[in-house]
Image: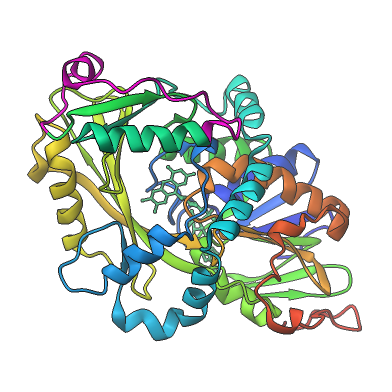
Amino acid sequence: MAGPRGEVAVVGAGLIGLFSAHYLLDRGYAVTLLERGDPGGGASRVNGGWVCPARSDPLPSYPVVRDGLRSLVPGAGGGFFLAPAAIPRVAGFLSRFVRSSTPARFERSWDELDGLNARTVELVDELVTAGLIGGLADEGFLMLHPTREEAEATRAALVTVARRGFCPAPEPVLGRSALLELEAGLGPAAQWGFLHRGDRWLDPSRLVDALIRSVVQRGARIVTDAAVSAVRAGRSGVTMVTARGDVEAGHAVIAAGAWSELLLRPLGVQGHVTPGKGYSFTVSPAAPPTHVLRLGSTHVGITPLGQYARVVGMVELDGTHERFRAGRVAAMKRAAAPYLSGVDWGASTDERVAPRPLTPDGKPLIGCVPGAERIVVATGHNMLGLTLGAATGTLVTELVDRGPAAAVAAFDPMRFTRGKGQPRVSTTDEAVTA
Ligand SMILES: Cc1cc2nc3c(=O)[nH]c(=O)nc-3n(C[C@H](O)[C@H](O)[C@H](O)COP(=O)(O)OP(=O)(O)OC[C@H]3O[C@@H](n4cnc5c(N)ncnc54)[C@H](O)[C@@H]3O)c2cc1C
């Protein structure tokens, strides 16, 4: 399949690929999305639906490292699981992750994520006005705890977070009877809590469907069952080798989520993008929640979706992208049950696992491949692909338009690459395998 020079091929039709396509179309590019399965078939439909610039703290931090170490003890709980057998495969990721977890580096990464989020609220509001994002809810996140001390400690931490400018200070801590007025279906563990406004949420699957409809209406092609096995750069264009034949374009965007590393390594980019699997499932509470519920120290969250509630949680590193472990869902149910009454936990539906594209410092990789600037990397969005998707799409469009001049150093895809890689472009116009 040959394409014009003004055509951009986007590898991966998840949220990042779709948001990129949206803004590239705005700028007048012709866009082809190449998707190995169905659009949104990675993490994009499985997620919690939070558009949460206020909660954009990077994953690498001492508490997460502590949880990871604890999880090596059989039977341990927590929200971060590291399978001992996977350690050799993810050793490079882990050593860099631990180095990124110091308080100073955690704060710096968070500041840099705030920089990318600076336009998130404005961009999302524009998409709402344009009718692309529907059902964005803003009733607030209800932070629930079994003790007053825990609730006050969480609130104090969020008072500090509010100084970053993405949310107001949290409301005062409430006792159980006041909480029940806000949310009738709370279980006995929800003794103390408070409301925190600012972040919003939606049904991620509806957003994926709306983005697909919109980009197709505006002329984008989505090619399904088109797994890309290599991206090759020439002087004036890029070739994607796919299961359905070669595709040529002026530029390529690698937005293959947790699978991106397979395409990056041959290009000389060591991104250390690693699958951190998360789980979600749906329940049907007698009194459906009307706020996002954060359940004490369980690392489990509940998102209201009309008459239903989506339960999300877990970060599991076991070296696989999609292996489903029923025990993780059972553990999430045990953690959530004390906080929400009137739920038949045995009747849950849509039990799913998907890989978050983790990076060692919790920040995405967004930028041009050195020596092959027509290839733009847009991956590694960790827990924040929905939140950062719109801002990423605008940055990708700038990178396609202006090349490395538009680069943002904090998201340099080469920052973990030893020796910073070699130029990967052929000396002739002929495409080369990178
Ligand atoms: C349980 C859970 C809860 C989450 N909650 C939130 C939340 O509330 N808010 C938030 O902001 N983020 C959340 N996230 C994170 C968010 O879902 C991800 O960051 C986001 O989905 C990443 O988007 P992506 O497009 O990069 O990857 P994906 O959504 O995984 O999409 C990648 C796409 O690329 C395709 N692909 C892969 N390899 C190839 C190839 N070689 N050729 C062609 N196509 C390929 C895949 O099939 C897939 O469709 C959550 C994630 C999980 C798992």
| Image x and y of residue 210, in percent | 52, 34
The answer to whether residue 348 is magenta is no
Work out whether residue 184 or residue 191 is closer to the camera in this orientation and state it: 191
| Image x and y of residue 372, in percent | 81, 72
Picture mark count: 0
| Image x and y of residue 82, in percent | 33, 71
What residue appears at the point 31 percent right and 50 percent down from the top-left corner?
A: 313
Q: Quadrant of residue 24?
A: top right
Quadrant containing the C terminus in the rendered view: bottom right
Report if residue 21 is visible in the image. no
- Which residue, as the protein is rendered here, is positioned at the far right? 428
| Image x and y of residue 311, in percent | 27, 42
What residue appears at the point 30 percent right and 80 percent down from the top-left corner?
A: 84
What residue appears at the point 58 percent right and 52 percent down from the top-left corner?
A: 107
Work out whether residue 241 or residue 154 is closer to the camera in this orientation and state it: 154
Quadrant containing the N terminus in the rendered view: bottom right
Q: In the visual, does 281 lie left or right of 134?
A: left
Work out whether residue 178 or residue 42 is closer to the camera in this orientation and state it: 178
Question: Relative to 96, is 277 above or below?
Answer: above
The answer to whether residue 175 is magenta is yes
Indicate how the structure is coloured in the image.
Answer: rainbow
Question: Relative to 420, is 26 above or below?
Answer: above
Q: In the visual, does 161 lie left or right of 317?
A: right
Q: Quadrant of residue 418?
A: bottom right
User: What predominant SS class does the magenta segment belong to?
Assistant: loop
Q: Which residues are magenta?
A: 161-188
Work out whether residue 194 or residue 79 is closer to the camera in this orientation and state it: 194
Report if residue 415 is visible in the image. yes
